[in-house]
Image: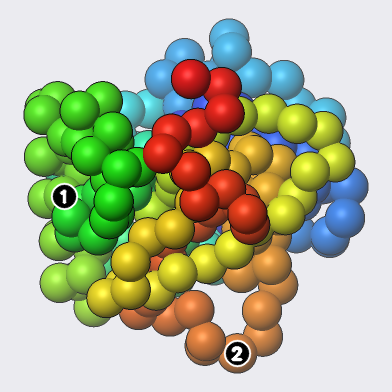
Amino acid sequence: MKILILGAVGQIAHMLKSELLNKTSHSTVLYARNGHKRLTLIDKSREEIFDGDFKDKDKLIDAMKDVDLVYINDMGDDKSTKTIINAMNDAGVRRVIAASVLGIYDEVPGAFGEWNKRMIGGIPRMQSQIESARLLEKSKLDYTLLRLTWLYNENRNTKYMITHKGEPFVGAQVTRQAVTQLIMDIIEEKSDKYFQTSLGVSEPNTDWAKPSFY
């Protein structure tokens, strides 16, 4: 399988690349602004770099040649999301996993929901996240949307739990390592169980009023 990682300099994207190289035979296309300056190839036979912007449709189409799956590391700009979807349609690529944030459906209840709204509910990027999710869900792509709770790093902590669209979101935090593991699990899933799904992603037993690191 050939996987295009959009936003390849991000922390989760970097972890995902490493996991793919170390644990699978898949190849990767790493796409980022100034990618050749900011990224280092470990296995040139299985990796390639594209310098590009998410709004550059022609460059995106070039990067999608022979790609089986696209991972979008950031959906905070709905104009970019629209361009990516259009490029995928033109390139004939259907499978996409996209990282978003919790709260886009006003699905976070209780004290944590109120805290989350105070922290990010009013920022412009939240509206872009909402619109990006709407665009993806309206598309004809085989998408998996990941609504990530508050992120932190902890080596070897790959525990995650999932809630589905329409269910209350539970969990105040999750490690980037756990999110990476979930993405790997979705990539390796042989069935279509994750197609056209929107998944809330958190760490078990973190049903708190705010993350532990705040």
Amino acid marked by disc 2? Ser
The secondary structure type at the circle numbered 2 is loop
Q: Tell me if I can see residue 162 in this picture.
A: yes
| Residue drawn 48% across the image and 43% down it | 208
Q: Nearer the viewer, residue 108 or 74?
A: 108
Q: Which residue is mark 2?
A: 191
**Left or right: 114 in relation to 208:** left
Q: Find residue 164 and report its horizontal and vertical position in percent.
A: 39, 74
Q: Quadrant of the N terminus?
A: bottom right
Amino acid marked by disc 1? Ile
Q: Which residue is mark 1?
A: 130
Question: Taking 177 as reference, is 199 above or below it?
Answer: below
Question: Taking 83 as reference, is 59 above or below it?
Answer: above
**Left or right: 151 in relation to 126:** right
| Residue drawn 63% across the image and 38% down it | 176
Q: Residues within 10 Å of mark 1 (few under 14, many from 20)?
A: many
Q: Residues within 10 Å of mark 2 (few under 14, many from 20)?
A: few
Q: Nearer the viewer, residue 58 or 74?
A: 74
| Residue drawn 49% across the image and 79% down it | 194
Q: Quadrant of residue 92?
A: bottom left
Q: Find residue 101 and report its horizontal and vertical position in percent.
A: 34, 45
Q: Nearer the viewer, residue 42 or 134?
A: 134
The numbered disc on residue 60 is none
The secondary structure type at the circle numbered 1 is helix
Q: Find residue 29 and report its horizontal and vertical position in percent.
A: 59, 43
**Left or right: 151 in relation to 27:** left
Whichever of callouts 2 and 1 sits on the residue coming sooner in the sequence is 1
Q: Find residue 125 and report its horizontal and vertical position in percent.
A: 18, 30
